[in-house]
Amino acid sequence: MGNSYAGQLKSARFEEALHNSIEASLRSSNGDPQPIFTQLYLDPEPYPGNMEDMKPKADLHRREPPSQELMNGHSSNDLEELEDDDDSDSSSPPLPYLQTPVPDGCCTLDGFCQAGKDLRLVSMATEPIEVPAGFELVGAKSPSVPEHILVCAVDRRFLPDENGKNALLGFSGNCVGCGEKGFRYFTEFSNHINLKLSTQPKKQKHLKYYLVKSSQGALCKGPLICWKDCKSRQFSSSASTSKPSSSSSLSSKENGGTSGHSSSPFSLSDSPPTRVTQASSVFFGSQDLSRDCSFLKPLASTPGNKTLPIVPTALRVNGPTNGLGVDGRPPLLSPSQVSLGPQGQGYRTADLGDSPVSSAMNSGPPKKRHRSWHPNSLVPVPPTAIPVPAIRPIVCSPGSVLGVSSPQAPVPGVIQPQPVNAGDTVIVPDNLLSSSGVRPVILIGHGTLPYFYGNVGDIVVSPLLVSCYKSSQLTEKTLETLGLNSSQLLCVETMILLTLQYLARLGSEQIPLREELEQIVLKAMLCCPGGPAISPTQLPWLARLEASVSGGSVQVVVTHSSLGEGISESLRSLSEGPHHQQCLPTYVVIICASKMTGNEFCVLVLGKYQARALAEGMLTTNEFLKEISYELITGKVSILASHFKTTSLGDNLDKQLVRYQRRRKGQVIQPFQGDVTDYIHSQEAASMSPPSDRAELLTKVFQIYPTQLSVARSLLSQVCSIADSGTQNLDLGRFCKVDFLVLVPPSHILVHQTAQRIRQSGVLVDLGIEDASSAYQKSDKYVVRLDGDVHAKMEAFMRKVKQNPYTLFVLIHDNSHVDLTSALSGSVCHGELQGLADRVVNCQEVLDAMNLLVLQVSCFPYTLQTRQSRISTHNEVHWPSKESLGVQSPSDLLYFGLRDYSRSLQWGVASPILRCDDAFEKMVHTLLERHPHLHSMVIRSYLLIQQYTEAMMALTSSPSLRDHITPETLAMVEDLINAPSREGSQGRGHMLLVRVPSLQLAMLARERLEDVRDKLGLQLCFAVLLGSPATELSLHRNFTNRLKAWRGCENEDWVPHTYEDLEGLPCIVILTGKDPLGETFPRSLKYSDLRLIDSSYLTRTALEQEVGLACTYVSMGVAQDPKKAMAPRESEGEKATTSLNEGDELERPQSNGSAATRASGSLAENGVSSSDVADSFQKPSTSSCPPEGAVTSDVGTVTQGFKQECDSLGSQLSSNSSKQSKAPPSLCSSSSSSAPSPSSSSTQRPSQSTQYGREPKPARVSPRTVIMSRAAYNLLAGESGSQLSSFSLLPHADVAWSSPLRPLITPNLQGADQSMYYRQWTVARQHHADYEAPPVPHPRRLLLSGPPQVGKTGAYLQFLRILFRMLIRLLEVDVYDEEESEEEEETSEVTTPINTQWPDIEEVRKLPFDPNPRDPKFRKASPVYTEKMPKCLKADFKQEGEMQTPAKRETKSIRLSRFAAHNAFHHCEQCHHYCEAGPATQLSECTFHAFTFCSSMLGEEVQLQFVIPKAKEQHFVFSQQGSHLESMRLPLFSTKDPALLKSPIFTPTTGRQEHGLLNIFHAMEGATHLHILVVKQFEMPQYRKYWPNHILLVLPAMFNNAGVGAARFLIKELSYHNLELERNRLEEQGVKRQDVWPFIVMMDDSCVLWNSHQPADCSETSDDGSTYTNVSLKMVLQHMETTPKISLYAMCGTRKWSSGLARKSTSQLYSRCHLHDFVMLNVDLTQNVQYDLNRYSCEEVDFNLRVNSSGLLLCRFNCFSLMKKHIPVGGNKDFLVKPKLMEIENPALISPSQYVCAPDSEQTLLDAPAQFLLERFLQSCSHRLFPKAVQNRNNPVLSIDSYLNISPEISVCYINSRPHSTNLNHQGLLFSGLLLYLCDSFVVSGLLKKFRFLKGATLCVISQDRSSLRQTIVRLELEDEWQFRLRDEFQTANCSEDRPLFFLTGRHV
């Protein structure tokens, strides 16, 4: 099969030609084979006659094979056909194959066997076929019916295995149609099934597919039969559905689609849509013939093709449906269409890495194939006419066709001669490349290109600029976005002139860039709509005028018949010889001004540099690496290699080295603390060890920096917003653990590096996944390389995910931009598996797991940000830019990234940090001209190796070579060799990084440099390492010992695993691999040599990731004040250093431990070059450099602030504070976290930075020096230079621009804006993993993007930590932790009852009742007077107005237990049926029931509404008709069911539909219970929404503004009424009335946990008072319900928990006191005691006092405590009191004293309930009403029948007016005031006469209205003892319709 490269043919070796010749003669029937020498050495003539006679005569004496074979000449019609027929016949001449005549009477119908049976898959699909054992069903392709597959049964042994191997030679098959068995020859079999071949039948060529059963049982096309070494063709198991293959190896050709991936997912039918029509199928009928096949039109496009690879090896031809005319011709194009212009995406610029098929290479690389196969590319293309399609595949919209023009439909199987118009063909001259030294590139313009034939390998057709001419295809919407309308589109003439203008102004070393021309076109459209009309006569004249300014570099050729004429002419003059070459133009613009077709044009690129760069730029990275390895393997480089065998002075290099080695006699250069001229014996040198000093050993502290913390927080808030989005995509409430796995690209070093970060961060211990002892060993388990073993590890991980639904897993895909090929098109590519990331991260299991988040981390996220992105824009977190970080302290290190490198070019310093080595570029240019056949990277590599070699020699043995080495190389090598010998360096030196993408070239470089180094005696001075992702670091023992000595490492076995471990080691690291994968380099990295990275790297990612290697953190001054900081050192180095170091350094105390500490941060993610400034900015030869300095850091001071802050998150998990590395002491690995380190110090002691004895100062950390090729330099300098900048390039090779024109991207477009830009303007290519992504982004996928080496690893590890803390925090709850106010003296005479389990009613009766509300929530309430009141008040009182801000109550965070009550955010498997409505249950499933009863208290009927879900109806009794609710079922005292809770639970709740703890499923341990939510009418819909399975009791609308008193009142009234109804109902059934259960439970919506307390004596811990354990609400209630004689208790309850309870021993197990929050109430006994329905606060105290004074028993179970959650929202929070009429814009806060006013006054009336205003007024202002009572405990205020809070300073004495009530003995007590609140008829004047008052005591009488106020005063004869004044009457500040309350004050007389 054709080579996917540039299609140049490979020089065939003699044996192969000989072999082919012999084989051909054996087969041939005419016995006259082509003589072998003719075949090898003669140039064939084009045959005018029948094509059948054309035998390709190879022309191999050109060194260079032609560039564009169309599949070596055979273009095949689609993926199925693109099989290599390599073996012999592809390289032998195709001889007409003579079929034996068909026997008479046999069927010869295509698709049927000779017995007449149908074999086509369509008809056989559902037939039962008998397949003998050992046979397989396979599909054969017949050239005569290409749209069908014929079914055959073949013996499995003769088919290859999945690796394309082990097929037996020969054949054995059966016919499935007629059942004939035992065909032993494929020839015989092919005749039987009527394949009608014109070439030798071969099973490899015609048996194409395995056939498989579909899910419906029908037979369908399966995967391709893998006849080749399938490494290159890994299709997914079923090719029929597979996406195109992603590699650029064979499979990609087979798929022929864009970017090396098939153009369409193969169709499942057996006639793929890409079939050629029968008419034109003659061209493709057999590949051998098709090699000679006639004149394919080169891709005239009709609108809208799917993918049109214009590629030699994969010419797609679409079927008739796609627009071929009846006769197989494509419809003609109007001249306005660009002939090669499929619509849609248009063409790519020399896109990196996306076509498998570019023919730009000087020679094609070998494909992975068996040694014995003969790559057919070794045979030159016969000089027949073949179209040379452009090399890049073009992505286009579906529908158009690559026209295969066939003037008449020929008879299948016979090729007719075809006339061709002279103007439409171009004969490419022979030896074009050899004679002219250039392989011309034709840039498609506008119009139809001619046919090319002859030596087509020597030209390249590129669609680079074609999209710029496609503006006519822009959609209206795009035009609108660009600010254009269709009238502004440019005409062809203007386009031609713009192109000319652009080409004329390109520099001699610049190549045309698509993006640049697109911007020019866009600007032209915007500034001159439509452009001036140019007549055809003006055009040539104007064009020549434009070209004239170019100084001869651009020429215009105008023709009148066709473009072909101009191309022919130009090529002929080019090949005619060297006399033209003096003035060869760089570009020839060919314009065809034809009357017929309008103006057409194309550009012929003849500039040697430009043509080569364009051609090479068309190859993907994989392709050019393969090309290079091919050139190395086949020995094409031997001429170049022999050139470099001599030195620049002409001596033989190896001989010179050997001579020098002998002269040394085993002596080597002293490795450190000596000069390059000091020699010592090698043994002695080897035993030298560098001076080490304990003080400077590394102590690693992992530290998180503020930026990382803020990024981690952004990630966390993003996760929270996913959880809060209400889409049920993530339920954070259910997780209690975090676990993770990091996926990294396939690099061993990266795995070690990430594992080390994990180890040092201590995250495994913090997450509780590993304990401290195992975390060190196990950190490797959490990092997985994306290589062949990843599937097993991922399966294990996914098992864990499934088995632990309560753990939140985070799958971190680090460097996620590296391999985003789709799994279906994945294959083995250049030794690397592709498509693995897609297989892992996008597999269905990962997408579906609800407890798995995917975090993709990338420094170049552009490929993840296309229109098809799987990541929502909201889920992207971008690293904050420097500007947004604000001011940093001068000691901080600043990140120095790509933009800074670009900006540094404007610093104007003598020695810039971003340089282009112009001397090197000049040498490269000379060599490129000399070797046009070799890939430029090969030439650059050889030159680079020579430069380093000679630099080493110049510095040691041959100083005369100095003048032949570029100054850059010399400076770097000199610095490398000399740095370790400088004073104070302790042998430490620099790292020099050389980037060599090709593994073979890198190995060559390493071998060469090591060899030269050793021969020169430098073997102990510096190491040479190969940095390959596929291997571990291997370092010579001597250097390992040196590293161990520096770090004081005791461990014998320690070896460096990461680049960071090489800190301080002088070394050259040759970094190889297709892409840099994100490894971090040590701070000692000083130089990054990128001179091999040139114009093949024309996408943004490819270019920026190379420069990203050098990015790091540097000292602030360096980045901010470069001119000053970078000043080259004056000769007296002293002065400059001082000035450099004075300003910005932070003086730090030197503590032993911290002197050499590198705080937290990785050497290299902070990767700062440890060199002193002068060092990196000046050539070492002249520098008097100081030793490397050290940034010291006193870790404590710097880190503590952030640590505190980031650790205080959640529950002070302090294990992390100032975390020391958890590794055992023997750990010697040095690399530390990825956190950028503001105080990161290099590994030296401070004293090393002394400049010859000066005071130590921290060294400046300078940016690394980057040396680049000219092409890359121009792009990075773009902001300052003339060319466009790297960020305007296509973002990544796997994506394409979505439109030929788009707005300019500006450098300040960063983060989210940049993401939006790429999401709008780029689309994923067909082989991209996102190409078929679902339309909606995945909800649980996040993207973290930040520049290279900025500290992303540290940020995501911190994110895991705070995510875990937050989950723990979600599992914790803040409960009130407040001590009860204690009584002064304990009652000692009462003994604790003996029976501890339950109270004894008699004992309880003996206990005194404590009327004082002691709960902390009543701290601000009035104390109730008792005889034992403390004499003084402890409280410190606030005056009115200060009460506005309530003091914060104490809370404590408690971990929820399994018995907790939960809010609406809790979900778990056990209780989801309890709180969530099932899909079936609609809201309508609830029924509404009115329940009416008469309330004596209200004096009217009350109608309550019940909302009862279907499932809860069993708790109620309905009338016979089933509609009317009669009562709520109550159990009996006698019921003994341990699973049953008897008391119905009522929870009044308001404003807390989400936050109220209304899910008591777990608190009840799942037991059956009746729980009723009591809600206000207006809130009913919200509560129904959140609690669809709860019974709601809806209060009447009149209570919408009422307080909690109303709810409690109605609950109690309803319950009593229901008790009576149930007694009546059950009495009819024979049950005694007394046996009906009379208790209800009234519970607040903030009760969260219940505890049981064991007294101290029973527990072991005697020092503590008591221990408590969490118990369930069920246990507490059942315990209370089973109390003996429970019916005699009016109320039972529990105490409130506080942390102090544990310290105090529970002296009394039971007490009589106030009960609240959680009360079991006997509605029978308390029938006559009501809650005050008007109350907003203290209603419970009021009720308790009344119950107790009525002689009823309250009992508190002190063995239980209740925890109440602090819920900041809802509940009975204060009304916002505001004026009724809001005239005032911003009303001032209204103080409580304004809540009352004189009746009928003009004061502002308020919008709040009267009762509320009254309560608040009394609470705040009672000191005015009762001045005598303030802080007077001995003279309380007398309050009759009610308890009101009249401020904590005033004591209240409560008296019940009812007869027979038990009251306090008030004999001898003088009251300071009297409070009468809404008194009823029980209060009579006689009662009041019993009490005595102080002189000047005050009275306050409160009534509903003015008249009742006067009646009360008269009825109670108050005027006898009290004096009233008219002005002492007040009302609450309500308007009359709000029914204000009135009160009157008076004074005792």
Image: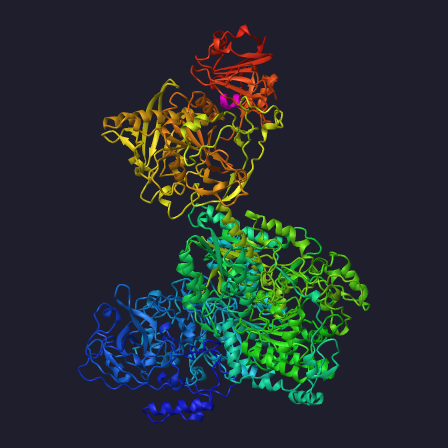
For residue 154, which quarter of the picture? Answer: bottom left
**With 530 as the anchor, is 1528 left or right in this view?**
left
Q: Which of the pair 482/25 is nearer the observer?
A: 25
For residue 1529, which quarter of the picture? Answer: top left
Residue at image position (40%, 59%) is 845
Q: Is residue 1811 magenta?
A: yes
Q: Is residue 1688 above or below residue 293?
A: above
Residue 531, position as x, y percentages in the image: 55, 58
Residue 872, position as x, y percentages in the image: 48, 53
- Magenta region, residue range: 1808-1815
Q: Is residue 473 above or below residue 41?
A: above
Q: Is residue 434 above or below residue 250?
A: below
Residue 796, position as x, y percentages in the image: 42, 63
Q: Which secondary structure is most common in the magenta stretch?
A: helix
| Residue 1934 appearing in the image | no
Q: Which of the pair 258/1853 is nearer the observer?
A: 1853
For residue 48, which quarter of the picture? Answer: bottom left
Q: Quadrant of the N terminus?
A: bottom left
